[in-house]
Image: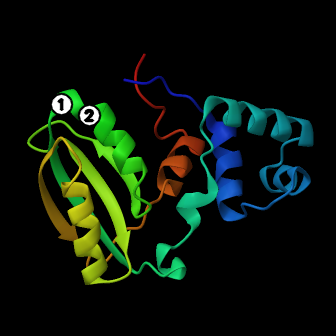
Amino acid sequence: MQKNTIDQIDARILLALNSDPRATAIALATTTRLSRNTIQARITKLQQMGVLRGFERRIDPGSLGYPIAAFIFTRVTQQKLSAISDALAEVPEVVEVLGLGGVTDLLIQVVARGTDDLYRVAGRILDIDGVEQTTTALVMRTFVDYRLTPLLESITQGRISGPSE
């Protein structure tokens, strides 16, 4: 289990950034009631720790012409996992690949222009050497979008402190 990497001050800064991702250090200092130097030092530390991720997650694939989203549950030959991962990285419609424990080895999130395109993308994945079986689940609706705000709010209020050491 990973040690807690942020404290209440970091969580306050992240909440302010989440509300206004383009805020300047001065604006963040005003919002959080911290000094500009503290804001800059903390943001630098968060970047170095890998806490702040890329901008890509904020882009809606539908606006790029890919309104269909699906998850492809995939069983693979474990000895070929590295080559499979490299091959999946070459498929532009693959937006995320997670390694799982259990009956499925990989959970692959893909986007597509339509159902025929999804069929093509799923076929391309199935054609990768070492991919044994896939099951595709079409995303029909998002009920809870990707979010971390409730966790950040809990940390700022001291309700959760992260994993025990």
Q: Is residue 12 left or right of residue 58?
A: right
Q: Amino acid at mark 2?
A: Leu
Closest to the observer, 163 or 97: 97
Closest to the observer, 149 or 136: 136
**Disc marking residue 78:** 1
Does 44 sit above or below residue 75?
above
Closest to the observer, 150 or 67: 67
Residue under the image location 43 percent in, 78 percent down: 66
Closest to the observer, 82 or 136: 82
Q: Amino acid at mark 1?
A: Gln
- Where residue 106 appears, as percent x and y from the top left, is 23, 45
Marks 1/2 in contact by CB < 8 Å: the verdict is yes
**Disc marking residue 59:** none
Q: Is residue 11 left or right of residue 75?
A: right
* Quarter of image, res 49: top right
Q: How many marks?
A: 2
**Disc marking residue 81:** 2
Count neighbours of disc 2 (C-alpha within 10 A) and say few if under 14, some if 14 to 19, many if 20 or more: some
Secondary structure found at label 2: helix
Does 60 sit above or below residue 37?
below
Count neighbours of disc 1 (C-alpha within 10 A) and say few if under 14, some if 14 to 19, many if 20 or more: few
